[in-house]
Amino acid sequence: MKSKTLNENKDFRRLYYRGKSQASPCLVTYVSKSRGNETRIGITSGKKIGNAVKRNRARRVIRAAYSVLEPRIDGCYDIVFVARTRTTYVKMQEVLSEMERQFIALGVIK
């Protein structure tokens, strides 16, 4: 099942304050049970990360890693990924293993 995107500020803020989170040097993940019947994801990358090229690469790497894990998600969640400075310098495989570890810790995948 294909995930929808989160794009409203109130949804991001709800996850930041009420969601469970896991952090690592290259990725921060916030997760909360979804109110609807679909999984929605949002990806943020602040100016601290670098110029537009670096921010877009960080988002692309996160999106690619998520697409690999997406079929394993059981249930409906709202998920926000926050890119960190290191995200722009690592390979997708590293972000994937980090994301998998975080998802297991948050109970999103088994």
Image: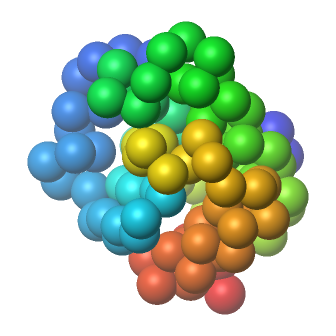
x and y, in percent, of residue 59 in the image: 62, 32
Answer yes or no: is residue 29 visible.
Answer: no
Q: Is residue 35 above or below residue 51?
A: below
25 to 19, vertically: above or below: below
- Which residue corresponds to the image point at 77% horizontal and 55% vertical from the top-left? 92
Q: Quadrant of residue 76?
A: bottom right
Q: Which residue is located at x 40 percent, y 56 percent?
A: 28
- Expressed as whole percent of the image width and height from the top left, the position of residue 34 reads 45, 48
- Camera-side residue of 87 and 17: 87
Q: Nearer the viewer, residue 25 or 22?
A: 25
Q: How many marks?
A: 0
Judged left or right of residue 109, residue 1 is right
Screen quadrant of the C terminus: bottom right
Coloration mode: rainbow
Residue 101 in view of the camera: yes
Residue 64 vs residue 44: left or right? Answer: right
As drawn, is 41 to the left or to the right of 19? right
Left or right of residue 11, residue 80 in this image: right
Q: Residue at x 69, y 75 (%)?
A: 97
Residue 33: image location, x then y, percent: 42, 57
Q: Position of residue 80 (x, y in %)?
A: 44, 43
Residue 5 against residue 106 in the figure, above or below: above
- Foreground residue among 40 and 104: 104
Q: Quadrant of residue 62?
A: top right
What residue lies at 14% left-to-right and 48% top-to-bottom? 17
